[in-house]
Image: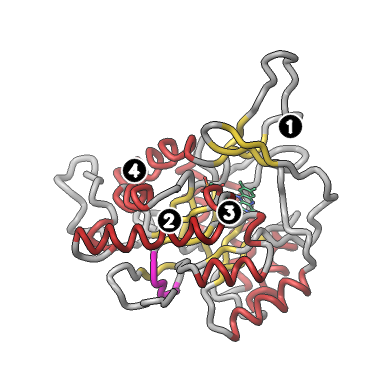
């Protein structure tokens, strides 16, 4: 599919000029060069890699469970080594492809070292995948933790950074901490804790609470982005959660997301599904007329204001 980086669907996010606001989110499907290239060929505005981690831990614990409203997954990080990832990222950079490296590590210092390596390999932007709840001891995310990881990365790389967070408790404080520490954008949301139980035996299906994604989380993420925009948050947001079709993309943009990530839906017919969403959005936009900028934030009436349309282009973070 031909990219049109200056067409009506084009957006500028994380310093990248993307042909579409529809981006592929991080996950198992973005752990392979072949998949990433196929998704870009299907028109992805950008692709976020599976989260790269210097010590991803033992394999074999990774399971997916499909639910009527989405998916539970117990996966964590890529098993590929950093050298292998850096060689892959270099090939993407040489081909000028919009591939965003997702990175995490066991400490802010380790993450800074990894961020420096992937920057040297040519990654044009980073997403900090610091909010995975599938680790052995779960996720106890705090503004201090978010700030420490973000600050460490900010010190070592000039490329734009999006910090990926999960919706939920103290989300505004965590977002503000990321921004104060130097983040350029926020990706919202990572998976949220979900549990499945066998009704007959009472057995907890995956052995605990793990990452819940897919259509069931979409209203929750929409509500949070809407509330953040109404409260005056100006920083670019990449919306993520439950997108299955062009209408879902339009909904995310309307509540104030600047770009939209798709992941779980791609576990069915990966690049064909992506192509349908991307082309469906292009058709929706063409039928409506105008550009993506006309759609972003159109549902949002700021508290105490008629509309934020006049000011929505100012993306200076509230600190
Ligand atoms: C199987 C699976 C693996 C995932 N792996 C990652 C990951 O490595 N890093 C990350 O930041 N998010 C990961 N995610 C989260 C997705 O990128 C996405 O943010 C989340 O699933 C919500 O969007 P969705 O409903 O479109 O999937 C994963 C999700 C799933 C279902």
The residue under label 2 is 260
* Left or right relative to 7: residue 276: right
Give the structural element (helix, strand or loop) at label 1. loop
Q: Earlier in the sequence, mark 1 or mark 4?
A: 1
Distance from label 1 to label 4 (Cα)? 32 Å
Within-10-Å neighbours for mark 1: few <14, some 14–19, many 20+: some
Q: State how the image is colored.
A: secondary structure
Indicate which label's residue lies in the foreground, 3 or 4. Answer: 4
Q: Which numbered circle lies on residue 226?
A: 4
> Dividing the image into 4 quarters, which one contains the N terminus?
bottom left
Q: Residue at x 29, y 61 (%)?
A: 283
Of pointers 2 and 3, the one earlier in the residue sequence: 3
Q: Secondary structure at mark 3?
A: helix
Q: Which residues are magenta?
A: 15-20
Q: Residues within 10 Å of mark 2 (few under 14, many from 20)?
A: many
Q: Which quarter of the figure is the C terminus placed in?
A: bottom left
**Which label lies toward us, 2 or 4?**
2
Label 3 sits on residue: 147
Disc 4 packing (10 Å; few <14; some 14–19; many ≥20): many
In this view, the residue in front, 136 or 250, is: 250
Gap between marks 2 and 4, in whole Å? 14 Å
Where is residue 301 shown, x and y percent of the image?
22, 44
User: Residue 201's x, y, as percent?
Assistant: 75, 14
Q: Residue at x 49, y 53 (%)?
A: 262
In percent of width and height, residue 282 lies at 32, 63
Residue 51's image quarter? bottom right
Q: Is mark 1 within 8 Å of ligand 1?
A: no
Residue closest to the eye, 117 or 8: 8
- The label nearer to you, 1 versus 4, is 1
């Amino acid at each position: 599919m031909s990219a049109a980086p200056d067409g009506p669907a084009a957006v500028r996010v994380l310093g990248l000029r993307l042909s579409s606001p529809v981006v592929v989110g991080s996950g198992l499907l973005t752990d392979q060069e072949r998949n990433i290239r196929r998704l870009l060929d299907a028109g992805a505005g950008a692709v976020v890699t599976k989260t790269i981690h210097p010590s991803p831990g033992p394999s074999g614990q990774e399971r997916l469970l499909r639910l009527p409203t989405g998916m539970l997954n117990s996966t964590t990080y890529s098993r590929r080594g950093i050298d292998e990832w850096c060689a892959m990222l270099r090939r993407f950079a040489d081909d000028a492809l919009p591939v965003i490296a997702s990175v995490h590590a066991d400490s802010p210092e380790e993450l800074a070292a990894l961020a420096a390596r992937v920057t040297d390999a040519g990654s044009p932007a980073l997403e900090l995948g610091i909010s995975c709840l599938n680790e052995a001891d779960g996720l106890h995310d705090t503004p201090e933790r978010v700030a420490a990881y973000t600050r460490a990365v900010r010190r070592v790389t000039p490329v734009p950074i999006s910090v990926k967070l999960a919706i939920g408790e103290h989300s505004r404080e965590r977002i503000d901490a990321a921004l104060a520490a130097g983040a350029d954008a926020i990706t919202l949301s990572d998976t949220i804790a979900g549990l499945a139980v066998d009704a007959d035996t009472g057995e907890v299906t995956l052995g605990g609470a793990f990452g819940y994604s897919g259509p069931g989380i979409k209203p929750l993420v929409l509500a949070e982005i809407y509330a953040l925009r109404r409260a005056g948050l100006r920083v670019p947001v990449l919306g993520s959660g439950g997108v299955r079709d062009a209408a879902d993309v339009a909904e995310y943009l309307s509540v104030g997301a600047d770009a939209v990530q798709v992941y779980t839906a791609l576990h069915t017919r990966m690049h064909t599904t992506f192509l349908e969403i991307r082309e469906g959005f292009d058709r929706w936009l063409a039928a409506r007329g105008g550009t993506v900028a006309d759609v972003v934030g159109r549902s949002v009436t700021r508290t105490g204001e008629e509309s934020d349309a006049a000011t929505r282009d100012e993306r200076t973070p509230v600190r």
